[in-house]
């Protein structure tokens, strides 16, 4: 079943726009690689300098990015992603960004619990007891596995410090 009337065209971000954004981002990254490589030295006086090989990779990166930009202009306009689809992606992506931002101040275990709870609230339709149980139990199990069993130290926050870890 289609939610748009017959003959109506879906609205969203075009493939051309998406490819231009990717190409521009890659061109900027290639420029940074080239700038850093030549700043370190990209010559071959007494053998390769520090930036020699990264500079060559940067030039290949730049050429590929320019090819993407030129190739994007040759494609007919078509929708890459509709606004409804992008909304669904953001429902997953935004909690992930918040999770990543909270790892440094709160530690990975508290952040993981908040991420699990937030994600289950936003995307899932679970009972509050199920959400709370999963959000508390999963980080505790991960803490036990990594910190106690494997002795792998992961980023910790104030809660872990309070308990002496």
Image (tube, rainbow, N blue to C red):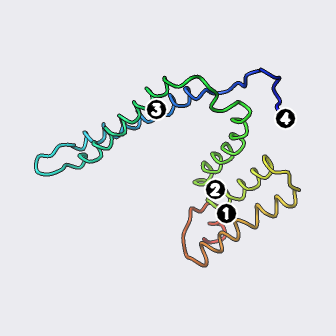
Q: Helix, strand or loop at disc 1?
A: helix
Q: Position of residue 129 (x, y in %)?
A: 87, 60
Judge depth for marks 3 and 4 and give the one in front.
4
Image quarter hosting the N terminus = top right
Q: How far apart, in angstroms, are the residues tagged by discs 2 and 4?
A: 45 Å
Q: Earlier in the sequence, mark 3 or mark 2?
A: 3
The residue labelled by disc 2 is 106
Q: Nearer the viewer, residue 13 or 4?
A: 4
The answer to the question of whether label 3 and label 2 lie on touching residues, with beta carbons closer than 8 A, is no
The residue labelled by disc 3 is 23
Left/right of residue 70 with respect to residue 143 in the rendered view? left
Identity of the residue drawn at 78% across and 63% down: 134
Identity of the residue drawn at 81% across and 51% down: 124
Residue 1 got which mark?
Answer: 4
The residue labelled by disc 1 is 159
Q: How far apart, in angstroms, are the residues tagged by discs 3 and 4?
A: 35 Å
Count of numbered circles on the image:
4
Q: Earlier in the sequence, mark 1 or mark 4?
A: 4
Q: Helix, strand or loop at disc 3?
A: helix
Mark 3 surroundings: few (<14), some (14-19) or many (≥20) residues within 10 A:
many
């Amino acid at each position: 079943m289609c939610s748009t009337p017959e003959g109506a065209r879906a609205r969203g971000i075009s493939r051309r726009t998406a490819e231009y954004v990717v190409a521009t981002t890659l061109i900027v990254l290639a420029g940074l690689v080239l700038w850093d490589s030549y700043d370190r030295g990209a010559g071959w006086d007494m053998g390769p300098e520090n930036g020699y090989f990264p500079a060559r990779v940067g030039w290949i990166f730049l050429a590929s990015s320019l090819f993407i930009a030129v190739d994007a202009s040759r494609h007919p306009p078509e929708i890459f992603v509709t606004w409804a689809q992008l909304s669904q992606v953001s429902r997953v992506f935004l909690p992930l960004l918040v999770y990543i931002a909270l790892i440094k101040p709160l530690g990975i275990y508290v952040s993981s619990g908040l991420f699990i709870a937030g994600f289950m609230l936003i995307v899932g339709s679970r009972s509050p007891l199920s959400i709370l149980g999963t959000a508390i139990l999963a980080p505790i199990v991960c803490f036990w596995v990594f910190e106690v069993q494997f002795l792998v130290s992961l980023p910790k926050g104030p809660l872990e410090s309070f308990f002496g870890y």
